[in-house]
Image (cartoon, grey):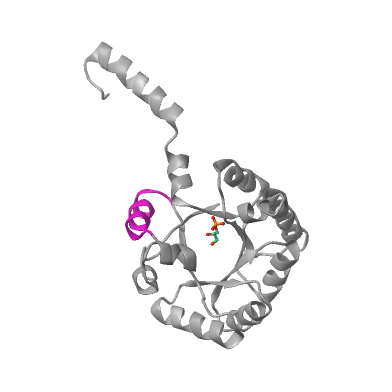
Amino acid sequence: MELYIDTANVEKIEQYCAQYPLAGFTCNPTIVTKENRTVEELVNLVPGKRVFVQAIAEDYEGILADARKLRSMRDDIYVKIPCTPDGYRAMYTLKQEGFGILATAVYTVGQALMSAACGADYVAPYVNRMSDTEVDGCELVEDIVCAFASQKIETKVIAASFKNLNQVVRLLVAGAEAVTIPLDLFEKLINNKLTNDATKVFADQWEAHFNRRAI
Ligand code: G3P
């Protein structure tokens, strides 16, 4: 299982990747611009972890140029490429050049299979965005997981676009190898109120008996 945070918040990336067993972080152009960050500020964060940055260009040659520029900044970068006609071509070319590739903006099983055929290391289905189109995003990801298993495809599913933890957990149970979750959900994942309340009661009772909140 690989856990990623989906953010361009530099401080939180450095903090959480140091404190928790996160595999790294992902971002996309919307996230980067909202955080008012630059690629240069993000690309070399958390050495030794996995970092995913998205190509911006929409045309084949432009995607190749973006990917090569990203790899010139960090040699183990994973380039996110949308599942468009030129995106597939770029994935196919870049994989032959040894790039790490994540096929992004996946909405169908067919796109996931085509991305895997082009050599993508990861495919990123947008779970909640699918749900906004009346497709059950979790069911579709489960279908992708099944399709990859039946075809013995090694490409990993990194599910993205979540609005609640139930979606995250359901897809990990379904066999998605990875999830990338927004900061607010990651903080909910590690900070359960019921657990915190129970822990406080334990310490209170211990302190009442032993006059200390420690062994
Ligand atoms: O990179 C994909 C992911 O960040 C999309 O999430 O919440 O914008 O649908 P969201």
Residue at far bottom of view: 61
- Decide: is 48 above or below 186: below
Residue at far left of view: 211
Residue 114, percent from left and from top: 72, 71
> Which of the two residues, 182 or 72, is positioned nearer the viewer here?
182
> Which of the two residues, 60 or 2, is positioned nearer the viewer here?
60
Q: Is residue 36 left or right of residue 161?
A: left
- In the rendered image, residue 57 lying in the magenta stretch gets the answer no
Residue 212, percent from left and from top: 22, 20
- Decide: is 60 above or below 136: below
Q: Is residue 73 visible?
A: yes
Q: Is residue 27 visible?
A: no
Q: Which residues are magenta?
A: 9-21
User: What main secondary structure does the magenta stretch of the protein show?
Assistant: helix
Residue 155, percent from left and from top: 64, 65
Q: Residue at point 69% right, 65% down? A: 112
Q: Report how many numbered discs are placed on residues in the image.
A: 0
Q: Quadrant of the C terminus?
A: top left
Residue 10, percent from left and from top: 34, 60
Q: Quadrant of residue 149?
A: bottom right
Q: Quadrant of residue 167?
A: top right
Residue at far right of view: 150
Q: Residue at point 45% right, 33% down? A: 192
Q: Residue at point 49% right, 81% down? A: 66
